[in-house]
Structure formats: C-alpha cells, structure tokens
Image (cartoon, rainbow, N blue to C red):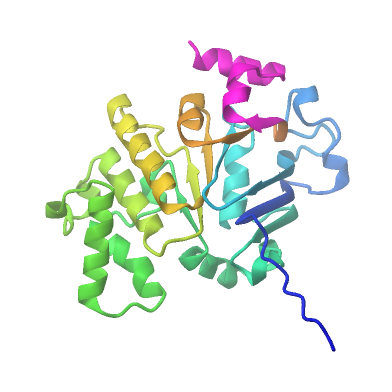
Amino acid sequence: MSTTHTVAPPAWALKVEGLGRVYGDPGPASLPGTGPEHGTAVSPATGAVVAAWDVSFEVAPGEALGIIGESGSGKSTVMRCVAGDETATAGAIALRGVADGTVNVCDLDAAARRKLRLRDIAAVYQDPAAGLNLDVTAGGNIADPLTAIGHRNYGEIRERAAALLQRVEVPLSRMDDLVRTFSGGMRQRVQIARALANEPPVLLLDEPTTGLDASVAAGVLDLLRGLLEETGVAAVVVSHDFGVIDMLTRRVLVMQHGRVVEAGLTDQLLEDPQHPYSQQLVAAARG
C-alpha cells in the first residue's frame, strides 16, 4: 500500500536568492574592487556598475520587509528586478503563487513576466506616472488590470473601482476625472488602488512618499500601514527614509554600494545599529 505525501507550500510569498544586477560587463572581473569596503559600485577593472549583488531575503504573507539605503545603494535596482522592470544578472526570484515557488521567475520570458504583474505581484512607484496612465480617469486606471484578467461586466468593474477609491480616500466625485488633473498625493492614492485591484499576494513599494509634502506623505503612510495590516500581503518597502521603514516594516535590510551590509528587526536596528553605515543612517533619521 503506497502512501501519498503532500508537500506543504512554502511559508514565504516571495523569496529572493543571490540576486545581482550589473550594468556593463557582467563577468567575474567586474566584481573585485566594488562594494562598501571599496566605497564604490563601479568596477575599477571594467567600468561596469555592480548595482546590486548577492541580495537574498524572504517575505511571508502579512509581513513587510524594508530595504533602506542612500541613492545609488542598489535598493531600487533590487525592487525593479523583483518587479520585472529590470533583468537580473544573477540569482533567483520565486513567488509562492507561481508553481508553489518552484520556478525561478527570472527565467520566464517577457510576456510571462508581464502576466505575473496582473495577479501575482504589483508595484507602487515613487513617480505615479510610472504606475498610472495620466491621460485616463481614476476609475479607468483601476479598470485596466481588472479587464486584463478577464472581467467584462461594466457595472461590477465600476463598483470594484469605486470601492478601491473609497478605500484609499479618493472622493468618488473624482472617479471620472483624468489622473493628470490630480495632485501628487491623490495620484499616489490612485496608484495604490490600482496596485490592489486584483488582490496581489506580493506588493512592492518604491519610495512611496518621496516628493510629497510632509502632511500629504503622512496621510499616505497612514493609509499604507492600514492597508498592509488589512490585506495581509507580503510587502517590500524601498526607501531612503528610516521614518518610512519604521512605520511600515518589521524587518529591514541596509544596502550600501550594491551590497547588504546589515539585516535585522527594524526596531532593534534602529535602537542598536551595528554597521557604521547603518549607524550613520539612524543618526540622520534622529536629526
């Protein structure tokens, strides 16, 4: 009598292993002489930029992981690779919802990666123009991902769009206005609504409040914190601001010159950073 063993799905929703992205010569000669210990991401041998290298992490459903670092640290490059906007030079990315995490999505072709953005992963960008069509209405921007996965009932689509706009506190009176006419903070809220339209299990947030006025940014952060708690998505939050990371995440990676220099619980790292660069970021955050 044979026994069938059921393999449990992974505990994580997103897993990244040894991720790397090099602009220029991706060969092994480009790696020496780069990284925090050398103070540069530019290869002295080839001139290639090692934007990110050997980055690994897992994110579970309902968990938010932060990636922090100054401009050029590699944090946004990691997010763009995970989102499929960039092609990784090395490493693997797995999504629990894709073949139970057994497929390296980096190996999928461009069309298959685009399909992942419809159901399995969504991104919110610093510039709303990267995640929205500014010449389409707020409701139309939310309808796009819904119709892309097969929704055809106009009334149901409009009802879903209205519910999402209410959720992100965009007045329904603006539902049929072009997004181009919205303020920066309002555009960001519409972008968040669009990202949540198909209830993706993984949400990527790239500098979601940068460029917004302080009071507007605070409102967007409050909204995001509530949504992350409510939806139970696995979130990756990329920011140069420890205030944002502290408010939204439980764990954090610190990146400098393309490498992870420290990782740990957000509150513990804020209280007792170990790496000199982390100490510098925390000191700056404390003013």
Residue for point 60% across, 38% down: 75
Taking the image as shown, residue 201 lies to the left or right of residue 139, namely right
Q: Is residue 271 magenta?
A: yes
Q: Does the image show residue 86?
A: no
For the N terminus, give its image quadrant. bottom right
Taking the image as shown, residue 17 lies to the left or right of residue 80, namely right
Label count reads: 0
Front residue of this view, candidates 75 and 103: 103
Residue for point 73% across, 39% down: 50
Name the spot of residue 139 as percent of width and height, x first.
24, 61
Front residue of this view, candidates 199 and 214: 199
Identity of the residue furthest to the front in this view = 1
Name the spot of residue 101 as percent of width and height, x first.
67, 64
Q: Is residue 231 magenta?
A: no
Identity of the residue furthest to the left in this view = 173
Name the spot of residue 46 as percent of width and height, x first.
81, 39
Above or below, 120 against 51 in this view is below
Identity of the residue furthest to the top in this view = 287
Majority secondary structure in the magenta region = helix
Identity of the residue furthest to the bottom in this view = 1
Name the spot of residue 255 as percent of width and height, x first.
66, 31
Above or below, 42 against 167 in this view is above
Q: Quadrant of residue 30?
A: top right
Magenta stretch: give its range.
262-287
Above or below, 147 against 181 in this view is below
